[in-house]
Amino acid sequence: MEHSAHRYGNKGELWLLSQSDLEVLGTEYTHVLKVVEEALIALRTGESINPLKTIVQPADQRSIGYSMVGRDGSSQTLGFKVVYEFDPQRNRDAYRFHSFIFLCDDSTGEPIAMMDVVKLGPLRTSATSALMARAAHPQAKSALVVGTGVQGQIALPMLLAALPGLERLMVYGNYRDGVKAVQAEVSRLYPQRQVEDVEDLQQAAGQADIIIGASGLTSKLQVHRAWMKPGAVAILLGYGIDADVLHEADYRIATDIEQMKVTCGDLCKADGSIPPVDAELPDILSGQALARRNPTDVVFAYNSGMVVTDVALGRYLAELALAQNRGVRVKLW
């Protein structure tokens, strides 16, 4: 990768990449998986750094704001991400979401870009889920996604990129338009593949090797541990998987245990506790830990976003945008 001075703009300029700039870049899911995997592995080599997020919220919970800084050693990139949500509980009918990430080249000191994360966030989250699934159940033949929002729509295509041997694809959702969107996205990328619209969540969960909980906060029905067959993997990145799967699983993995403790409040017992986590994804990917002990283990995987993957994937998107001459530059400094 070239690192010449002022590669991303003239001195004093900041390159801005909007939602529309990032939507048309033609990202390749197999490459997204590679970028995210390399970023996670680099956490164990000492090249990458991923501190816990800082969170602020008023007493009435009308909003939530958090910020993260991270360094991706594989691409020599530093990133600062900020997120602000208004009405995060969706009880005021006034939901607002604003977020961006600012990237710097840590080999030259040059600012790279400030970009929207609406495209980036679902990409890195779905890639992380797919890496968890591939590690814990590489021979999986069936997958169920619970939820049809942005995360639900990208989950199955990313799973297929990681596990092309999947034969049966299922989706459960409360909104017809969302289900159709999931089916359309899979058909767009994999014209020969079809997604079943399942109505009985319990029956579908009992037949799935991989279950991804990608529902929103208002999810009314969730997968329970008793519904899952031996050897199944449940990956939670939103809602749609009950806390009893975490507490009664045979094996538990997380992207980051300490970050899980910060963000999994709704999964805790009444005393605020959660069971021990057996392994972290960076250790699994680097060959230092197992993704399961036995083939019949029911595995619970907690996918909490890690800023180091945002940084690495942001750098990948920036390189694509640079090649296509996207975005605008403003004189800032």
Image (cartoon, rainbow, N blue to C red):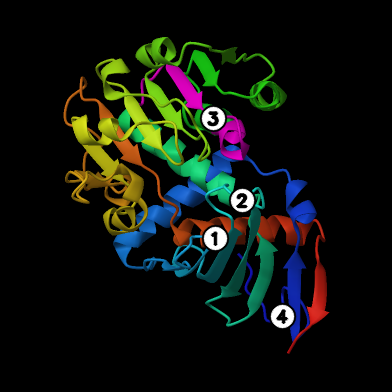
Q: Say which residue label 2 marks.
A: 92
Q: Is residue 10 above or below residue 280?
A: below
Q: Residues within 10 Å of mark 2 (few under 14, many from 20)?
A: few
Q: Position of residue 323 (x, y in %)?
A: 76, 58
In terms of depth relative to the viewer, which is nearer, 126 or 321? 126
Q: Say which residue label 1 marks.
A: 62
Residue type marked 2: Arg
Residue type marked 3: Gly
Residue type marked 4: His
Q: Say which residue label 3 marks.
A: 147
User: What distance separates the C-alpha of mark 3 from that of mark 4?
Assistant: 43 Å
In terms of depth relative to the viewer, which is nearer, 62 or 326? 62
Say which of marks 1 and 3 sits in front: 1
Magenta segment, which residues?
138-155
Q: Say which residue label 4 marks.
A: 6
Q: Earlier in the sequence, mark 3 or mark 4?
A: 4
User: What distance separates the C-alpha of mark 2 from that of mark 1?
Assistant: 8 Å
243 left or right, relative to 167: left
User: Are the residues flagged by discs 2 and 1 in contact, CB closer than 8 Å?
Assistant: yes
